[in-house]
Image (tube, rainbow, N blue to C red):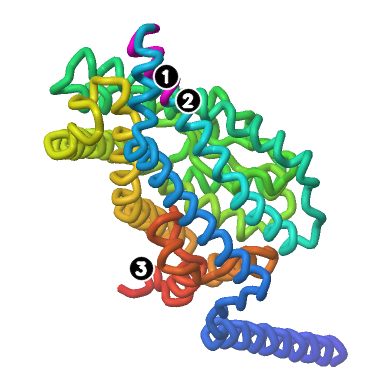
């Protein structure tokens, strides 16, 4: 009798436990179904102000970059320098004009850059670097760019003289080949170490196996400070490509965020987007330099007398080349950025198809605004067209909220 009573009590307890467990599952399911979408965060006033100042500085600097070679052409400064130094050789003369133009371009940017960096310091609530320390730092930072730009300009000028009718083709091929070497060799020059065996690293490796990414193709990037590197990115091209995860963020972020980030980068790796990007870049180089050649020819047919030279194979034509290339560059920026944003949007879609969790992506992207003092979720159209390589945070959150896996939809 006691045994029967004991068994009845045990069965009653088990039935209650099952009911309670079922109730918990129902509640959790209801929460997941009726949970509201991730809200788009509201940026701080300081972030909006910095965004505006940053756009103005960028835009004015581009205008100044166009005005400077125009001043050279209108004033005849390039032609006068050419007359005085031509006895030393046209290549040295061209290099002198190019270096002068690039140095002046770097100097005229300093006042506006100072305004931008001061505004950024205000948004971060840190003291701005003293002016007398800031200027030498900026000069030293600009020096490599000036040297490389001068060397590249001289090489282009050499190709123009070697092949006046096909220089644009050889220049595009040269830049394309250089880009290929840089992309293929990038993993060799990026500090990283093999992924380890911590629980989260093991989960990443397991996740990678689902899409056919070998463990040897995943590595950890050490960044000091931690936020000096992006969360993750793919370097290399073809057989050298590698997914790099920010080691510091890997340790501090939720596991679900890490897996969602890795899922996004998996698309870039599996589809070898760097190879696709290189092919597109090669096409851009061809169109870019061909357009510059055609525009320069038209300009010289109409204004050669006023300009003081009649061929881009002359050293005095350097400012005209810079002006035309700068204009073509600005015209090309919107379609290039829209293409890059499309690639990143598709990586978001690919990642969500793998994880099936739009809420994680929404919360992660939302955190970028809420933890930043200068980020805005909905940048201006100007920023998106001319400066952004990724979709806006707001559009990514909205997409994550609306996303439904194909399997669920079917």
Residue for badge 2: 99
Q: Residue 290 versus residue 256: which sits nearer the camera?
A: 290
- Label 2 to label 3: alpha-carbon separation: 59 Å
Q: Tag 1, which secondary structure?
A: helix
Labels 3, 1: front one: 1
- Label 3 to label 1: alpha-carbon separation: 61 Å
**What residue is at 13 percent from the left and 22 percent from the top?**
165
Q: Residue 295 versus residue 182: which sits nearer the camera?
A: 295
Which dot marks residue 407?
A: 3
Quarter that holds the C terminus = bottom left
**What residue is at 39 percent from the left and 16 percent from the top?**
84
- Where residue 261 appears, x then y in whole percent? 55, 54
**What residue is at 37 percent from the left and 19 percent from the top?**
94
**What residue is at 55 percent from the left and 43 percent from the top?**
108
Whether residue 286 is visible here, answered yes or no, is no
Marks 2 and 1 in Cβ contact (< 8 Å) = yes
Q: Residue 80 versus residue 363: which sits nearer the camera?
A: 80
Residue for badge 1: 95
Whether residue 406 is visible here, answered yes or no, is yes
Q: Is residue 406 above or below residue 208?
A: below
- Where residue 206 appears, x then y in whole percent? 55, 45
Q: Is residue 310 magenta?
A: no
Quarter that holds the N terminus = bottom right
As drawn, is 302 to the left or to the right of 211? left
Q: Tag 3, which secondary structure?
A: helix
Q: Which residues are magenta?
A: 88-97
- Where residue 191 appears, x then y in whole percent? 63, 29
């Amino acid at each position: 009798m006691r045994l029967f009573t004991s068994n009845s009590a045990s069965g009653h307890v088990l039935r209650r436990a099952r009911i309670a467990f079922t109730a918990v599952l129902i509640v959790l399911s209801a929460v997941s179904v009726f949970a509201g979408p991730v809200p788009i965060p509201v940026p701080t006033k300081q972030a909006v102000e910095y965004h505006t100042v940053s756009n103005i500085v960028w835009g004015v600097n581009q205008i100044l970059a166009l005005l400077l070679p125009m001043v050279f052409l209108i004033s005849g400064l390039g032609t006068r320098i050419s007359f005085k130094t031509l006895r030393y050789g046209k290549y040295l003369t061209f290099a002198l004009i190019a270096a002068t133009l690039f140095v002046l371009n770097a100097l005229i940017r300093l006042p506006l850059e100072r305004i931008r960096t001061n505004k950024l310091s205000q948004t971060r609530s840190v003291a701005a670097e003293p002016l007398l320390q800031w200027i030498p730092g900026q000069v030293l930072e600009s020096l490599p760019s000036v040297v490389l730009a001068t060397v590249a300009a001289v090489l282009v000028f050499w190709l123009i003289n070697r092949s006046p009718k096909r220089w644009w083709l050889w220049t595009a091929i040269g830049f394309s080949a250089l880009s290929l070497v840089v992309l293929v060799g990038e993993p060799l020059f990026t500090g990283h170490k093999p992924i380890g065996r911590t629980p989260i690293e093991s989960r990443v490796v397991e996740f990678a196996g689902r899409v056919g990414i070998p463990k040897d193709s995943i590595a950890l990037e050490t960044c000091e400070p931690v936020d000096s590197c992006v969360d993750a990115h793919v370097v290399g091209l073809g057989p050298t490509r590698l997914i790099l995860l920010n080691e510091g963020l890997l340790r501090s972020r939720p596991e679900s965020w890490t897996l969602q980030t890795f899922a996004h980068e998996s698309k870039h790796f599996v589809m070898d987007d760097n190879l696709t990007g290189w092919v597109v870049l090669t096409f851009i180089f061809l169109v870019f330099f061909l357009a510059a050649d055609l525009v320069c020819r038209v300009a010289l047919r109409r204004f050669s007398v006023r300009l003081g030279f009649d061929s881009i194979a002359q050293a005095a034509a350097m400012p005209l080349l810079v002006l035309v290339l700068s204009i073509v560059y600005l015209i090309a920026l919107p379609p290039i950025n829209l293409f890059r944003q499309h690639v990143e949007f598709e990586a978001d879609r690919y990642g969500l198809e793998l994880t099936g969790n739009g809420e994680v992506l929404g919360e992660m992207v939302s955190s970028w605004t809420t933890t930043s003092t200068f980020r805005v979720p909905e940048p201006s159209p100007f920023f998106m067209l001319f400066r952004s390589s990724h979709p806006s945070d707001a559009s990514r959150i909205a997409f994550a909220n609306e996303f439904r896996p194909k399997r669920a939809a079917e």
